[in-house]
Image (tube, rainbow, N blue to C red):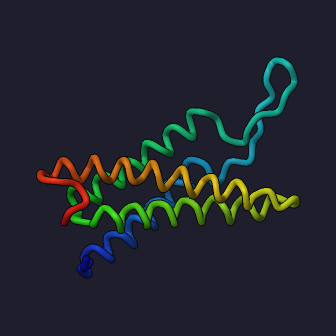
Amino acid sequence: MRFGKKGWFGAAGLAVATVVAWWAWLGHDRTYQVDANGNRQGPYTTAQVAFCVLTIAVLLAVAVRFADVHPLLAVGATTVGFTAAWTVDAAIKDQSGLFVIGGLLVLVVTAVGSAVVAFLADLTRGGKAFTR
C-alpha cells in the first residue's frame, strides 16, 4: 500500500484540523458546573462533547470522501491528533498520573470511532471500503 503526497498532506491537515476542533469545543473550557445536589460536573458538557465528535466525524468523512485521503491515514491522523491534544491538556491539569489511563481510553475510542466513520465514508466512494 502506497500513499501519495496528496494523501500525506491531507492527513497532516486533518490532524491539525482535529486538534483545532478539540480546542474549539473542549480545550479552552475549565468551567465546572454544579448540579441541583451540589455535585461538581465537568469541565465538559454533553453538548460540547457531542459537537466535538460530530465536527471531527465530518472532517474525517470529508477528508476520505472528497480530499482523497486514504482511510487508514485519516484514522491515524484523527486518532493521533485528538489523543495528543487531550492527553497533553490532561497531563498539565492532573497531579495523580491517572491521565495516562484516560489517554489510553481516548486513544481506543477515537481509533474505533474514526475507523467506523472512515469505513463508511470510503464506502460512499463506490466499491469496497479500505481496498484502494
Quarter of the image that includes the N terminus: bottom left
Query: At 19% from the left edge and 66% from the top edge, which residue is drawn?
Result: 132
Q: Number of callouts in the render?
A: 0
Q: Is 60 in front, or is 132?
A: 132
Query: At 23% from the left edge and 80% from the top edge, which residue is drawn?
Result: 4
Residue 112 vs 85, above or below: the answer is above
Looking at the image, residue 34 sits to the left or right of residue 23; the answer is right
Q: Where is residue 62 in the image (x, y as percent from the top left)?
A: 28, 54
Quadrant of the image occupied by residue 45: top right
Looking at the image, residue 104 sits to the left or right of residue 124; the answer is right
Q: Position of residue 20 (x, y in %)?
A: 50, 60
Looking at the image, residue 6 sits to the left or right of residue 117; the answer is left
Q: Where is residue 122 in the image (x, y as percent from the top left)?
A: 23, 53
Q: Position of residue 12 (x, y in %)?
A: 39, 73
Quadrant of the image occupied by residue 15: bottom left
Residue 43 vs 71, above or below: the answer is above
Residue 99 vs 30, above or below: the answer is below
Q: Is 129 in front, or is 124?
A: 129
Looking at the image, residue 32 sits to the left or right of residue 15; the answer is right
Query: At 35% from the left edge and 68% from the top edge, which residue is drawn?
Result: 73
Q: Most extreme residue toward the left, as rendered? A: 126
